[in-house]
Amino acid sequence: MKNNRLERVNAELQKEIATIINNDLRDPQITSLIGVSEVSVSPDLSTAKVFLSIYGGDSEEVLNRIKGAGSFIRGKLSQRIRLRITPRLEFFLDNSQAYGQKIDSLLNNISYSTNPDDKFDYEED
């Protein structure tokens, strides 16, 4: 079970990092829509894993640019939140949506080898 304080810190970090990336980060090379899908801070609050959803453009290139701006984002974050230590940020691509779409596509393309009108006998124990 997660600590309630960690959950609140995660939610606050997620909100503030998204605001900083979308409003304060002025990189003309980033034209993609970026969402912060999840933040997971370590129990000692020293590091935070930030999972980004990137829509449009080259996801890897955008991720590398965000990683390059990590110290800027951390500096802005330290001004906006009140923690004893501002966590070190580690950025990752969140591929869960693409993975879900792939699974949906695979499920939709399954061909059934049996007749749908066939009845199956199940033995009950």
Image (tube, helix red, strand yellow):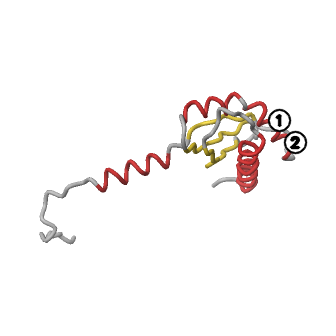
Residue 13 point in image, percent of width and height: 74, 47
Find disc 1 in the rendering and name its residue.
Answer: 75
On screen, residue 16 versus residue 95, left or right, reads: right
Image marks 2 and 1: residues in contact by CB distance under 8 Å: yes
Q: Amino acid at mark 2?
A: Gln
Find disc 2 in the rendering and name its residue.
Answer: 79
Q: What residue do we see at 54% from left, 37% from top?
A: 57
Depth check, front residue: 123 or 54: 54
Taking 120 as reference, is 9 above or below it?
Answer: above
Residue 89 point in image, percent of width and height: 71, 35
Q: Residues within 10 Å of mark 1 (few under 14, many from 20)?
A: few
Depth check, front residue: 104 or 23: 23
Residue 94 point in image, percent of width and height: 55, 43
On screen, residue 44 versus residue 32, left or right, reads: right
Depth check, front residue: 88 or 46: 88
The quarter of the image holding the N terminus is bottom right
Which labelled disc corresponds to residue 8? none
Depth check, front residue: 67 or 13: 67
How far separated are the C-alphas under marks 2 and 1? 7 Å
Q: Amino acid at mark 1?
A: Gly
Q: Quadrant of residue 62?
A: top right
